[in-house]
Amino acid sequence: MYDSNNQYPPAPPTPPLSPAGDDFKLTKDVIRRIKPAYPIIVSLVYLIAGFAFNLWNPGWMLFLTIPIFFIVTRDLN
């Protein structure tokens, strides 16, 4: 576990944290397709969580993600 100088071995390189190049274009394309349907998706998830798991009270917080989603993705037009 230690080398001869009692030091830790070097850490392996880490992958990049943000997508780049063609992967980023794919992500932008996916977000553009989801963007118009996002409120409907959130509503369906809320109804499923409410009817299936009786999570009506905490489920309303899903609706708070709608403006957050549009604020975060507004530069991807």
Image: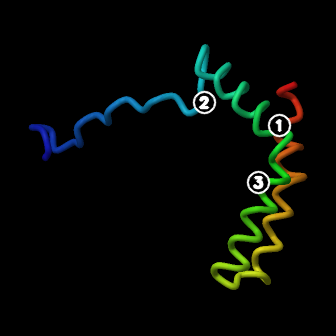
Farthest residue, direction left: 4
Residue designated by label 3: 41
Q: Quadrant of residue 66?
A: bottom right
Amino acid type, residue under disc 2 in the picture:
Ser
Quarter of the image with the C terminus in it: top right
Which is more foreground, mark 2 or mark 1? 1
Distance from the alpha carbon under mark 3 to that under mark 1? 16 Å
Q: Is residue 77 above or below residue 11?
A: above
Residue at the image point whose x is 78% and y is 58% from the top = 42
- Please tell me which of labels 2 and 3 falls first in the chain: 2
- Please tell me which of labels 3 and 1 falls first in the chain: 3
Residue at the image point whose x is 83% and y is 41% from the top = 72
Which numbered dot is residue 73?
1
Work out whether residue 8 or residue 67 is closer to the camera in this orientation and state it: 67
Within 10 Å of the Cα at label 3, are there few (<14), some (14-19), or many (20+) other Cα atoms? some
SS under mark 2: loop
Amino acid type, residue under disc 1 in the picture:
Thr
Q: Position of residue 29 (x, y in %)?
A: 72, 25
Amino acid type, residue under disc 3 in the picture:
Ile
Which numbered dot is residue 18?
2
Q: Quadrant of residue 6?
A: top left
